[in-house]
Image: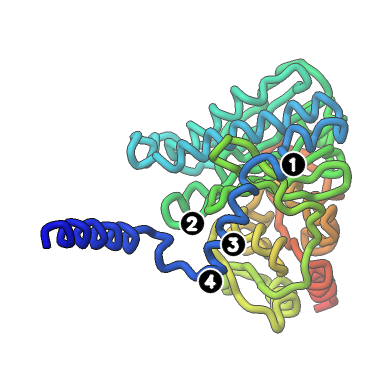
């Protein structure tokens, strides 16, 4: 009896341990799927630096690798921000006259340190009043270190970069810059998972950050813009729109479902991968538009165009708009080419 009781006790404990396991109730197909996915986090997917090697010049590869590495570090800071006194405001305002969050300042410093490379002649950040002249190589890096920082804790935030050449000086009326001078563009969305969308060599690819070995793995090669399913716009601004904007928004979004998070990078990622159109037109509160050309509008425009989509200011490609100031603003309509074209047709139609 004693032996049987001990054996029964061991068996009961084993059953309880099995039931406590998170895998105990998984269906066989789920266990198989999980086991099949495990190797994918290792070396079976191309890593970013290997992907860039030979694809772009070494100087550009160094910039993009540094941007990716800094983004990985920022991901960690965001994950632990409530534990490390990185939430809240600094008490200062940036050049946009917007309150500076502690994470804005942290992110800006992170990318400044990362991008001071021999091939970089200039840094233009959303957080800095003036460009930082380095006097290095041919590249100007324009970046928004933490896009959507007002959404921290409630929506995904991200980072955006455009890498330009041929910019002998900071943009001015005498020396305007075009988005077509970009050699590469990228944005990161700090979500679950953390993803980076990268445009190089006329192609767009998506990478996922693997925390197990701290690498970026190619998970969606040769991304193509999908047919429109979603319209991403803040409908609460409708009373600020001109008749032309209201008409164009209605035409572009007709038959689409609404999805809007208030975080540009999150909404653009959805539009790119799932299909749709992102709309941030000018309005009476921001007659020139709200987003910034060099480090928000143009990088998103390059990514959309190279993925087979489109990005316009209402009438023309955002990549053809002369940029005459580092923090110049503009409107943006980006996504599936057919939806963007519907916007353009209605926007430019006679009243």
Q: Find numbered disc 1 in the image and state the secondary structure of the residue it sits on.
A: loop
Asked whether the beta carbons under mark 3 and mark 4 sit within 8 Å of each other, the answer is no
Compared across the picture, whether 247 is left or right of 235 comes to: right
Percent from the top left, x then y, of residue 155? 48, 56
- Residue placed under numbered mark 4 in the picture: 236
Question: Dividing the picture into quarters, in which one does residue 335 lie?
Answer: bottom right
Percent from the top left, x then y, of residue 182? 82, 39
Residue sitting nearer the eye, 248 or 350: 248
- Residue placed under numbered mark 1 in the picture: 46
Nearest-to-viewer mark from 3 and 1? 3
If the image is split into quadrants, where does the C terminus sit?
bottom right
Q: Find numbered disc 2 in the image and state the secondary structure of the residue it sits on.
A: loop
Q: Find numbered disc 4 in the image and state the secondary structure of the residue it sits on.
A: helix
- Residue placed under numbered mark 2 in the picture: 155
In terms of sequence position, does the residue under pointer 2 or pointer 3 come before the other? 3
- Residue placed under numbered mark 3 in the picture: 33
Q: Find numbered disc 3 in the image and state the secondary structure of the residue it sits on.
A: helix
Question: Dividing the picture into quarters, in which one does residue 57 lie?
Answer: top right
Percent from the top left, x then y, of residue 42? 63, 41
Percent from the top left, x then y, of residue 71? 59, 37
Asked whether the beta carbons under mark 2 and mark 3 sit within 8 Å of each other, the answer is no
Give the residue displayed 44% in from the left and 40% down from the top. Answer: 101
189 to 335, vertically: above or below: above
- From where the camera sits, is residue 64 visible? yes
Nearest-to-viewer mark from 3 and 4? 3
In terms of sequence position, does the residue under pointer 3 or pointer 4 come before the other? 3
Compared across the picture, whether 159 is left or right of 119 comes to: left
């Amino acid at each position: 009896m004693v032996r049987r009781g001990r054996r029964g006790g061991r068996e009961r404990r084993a059953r309880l341990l099995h039931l406590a396991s998170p895998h105990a109730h998984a269906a066989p197909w789920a266990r198989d799927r999980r086991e099949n996915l495990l190797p994918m986090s290792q070396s079976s997917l191309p890593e970013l630096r290997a992907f860039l090697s030979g694809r772009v010049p070494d100087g550009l590869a160094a910039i993009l690798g540094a941007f990716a590495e800094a983004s990985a570090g920022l991901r960690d800071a965001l994950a632990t921000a409530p534990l490390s006194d990185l939430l809240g405001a600094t008490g200062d305002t940036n050049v946009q006259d917007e309150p500076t969050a502690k994470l804005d300042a942290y992110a800006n410093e992170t990318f400044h340190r990362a991008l001071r490379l021999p091939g970089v002649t200039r840094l233009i950040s959303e957080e800095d009043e003036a460009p930082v002249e380095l006097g290095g190589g041919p590249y100007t890096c324009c970046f928004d270190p933490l896009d959507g920082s007002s959404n921290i804790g409630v929506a995904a935030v991200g980072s955006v970069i455009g890498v330009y050449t041929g910019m002998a000086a900071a943009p001015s009326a005498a020396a305007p810059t075009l988005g077509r001078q970009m050699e590469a563009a990228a944005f990161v969305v700090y979500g679950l998972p953390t993803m980076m969308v990268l445009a190089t060599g006329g192609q767009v690819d998506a990478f996922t950050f693997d925390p197990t070995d701290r690498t970026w793995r190619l998970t969606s090669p040769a991304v193509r813009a999908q047919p429109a399913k979603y319209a991403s716009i803040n409908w609460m601004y409708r009373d600020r729109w001109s008749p032309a904007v209201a008409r164009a928004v209605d035409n572009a979004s007709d038959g689409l479902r609404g999805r809007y998070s208030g975080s540009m990078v999150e909404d653009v990622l959805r539009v790119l991968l799932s299909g749709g159109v992102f709309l941030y037109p000018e309005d009476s509160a921001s007659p020139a538009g709200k987003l910034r050309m060099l480090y928000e509008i143009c990088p998103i425009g390059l990514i959309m165009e190279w993925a087979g989509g489109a990005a316009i200011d209402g009438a023309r490609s955002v990549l053809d708009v002369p940029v005459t100031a580092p923090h110049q603003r503009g409107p943006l309509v980006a996504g599936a080419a057919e939806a963007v074209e519907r916007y353009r047709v209605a926007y430019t139609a006679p009243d």
